[in-house]
Amino acid sequence: VKEATAASVMPIAQPGELSLANVQDDVDEQVLPIFLEEAAELFPQAGEQLRAWRHSPANADAAQALRRSLHTFKGSARMAGAMRLGELTHGMESRLLAGDALAKP
């Protein structure tokens, strides 16, 4: 039986991809309920903002509102110790910012 090596099993990150391999959560049980309450408000807002932006991609206000929600969610996740979630959200926020940079002359 041939053993699989780590290199053959682990996916290789492509340029620009986010790797969470070295990111560890350290959830603060006292802050977690506050984060969950805020997240319950931010998720629907972000969903609406994403739909508005997809409907009208040239609408800078819609993109800005989505970035603000993602930024707030990222910070809240990190404050609660949900570091992996914070990093994923940071990746989304960064992609939006990169898209803005590409769209500007």
Image: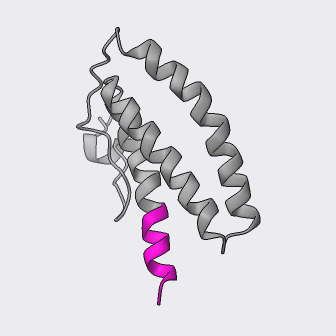
Quadrant of the rendered image containing residue 16: bottom left
Q: Which color mode does the image show?
A: one colour
Instruction: Please say if 38 is above or below 95.
Output: above
The answer to whether residue 101 is magenta is yes
Instruction: Please say if 84 is above or below 65.
Output: above
Q: Which residue is drawn at 44% across and 54% down?
A: 93
Q: Could you tell me what secondary structure mostly forms the magenta stretch?
A: helix
Q: In this view, does 5 lie to the left or right of 77?
A: left
Give the total of numbered labels. Answer: 0
Residue 36 drawn at (x, y percent): 51, 20
The answer to whether residue 103 is magenta is yes
Q: Residue furthest left?
A: 22
Residue 11 drawn at (x, y percent): 37, 48
Quadrant of the rendered image containing residue 35: top left
Q: Residue at x 32, y 47 (%)?
A: 19
Quadrant of the rendered image containing residue 42: top right
Q: Residue furthest top?
A: 30
Residue 60 drawn at (x, y percent): 59, 69
Q: The N terminus appears in which quarter of the rendering?
A: top left
Residue segment shown in magenta:
96-105
Q: Residue furthest right?
A: 55
Residue 89 drawn at (x, y percent): 44, 44
Q: Is residue 37 left or right of residue 78?
A: right
Q: Which of 92 and 40 is in front in this view?
A: 40
Q: In this view, does 30 lie to the left or right of 53?
A: left
Q: Which residue lies furthest to the front in this view?
A: 61
Q: Which residue is drawn at 71% across and 62% down?
A: 54
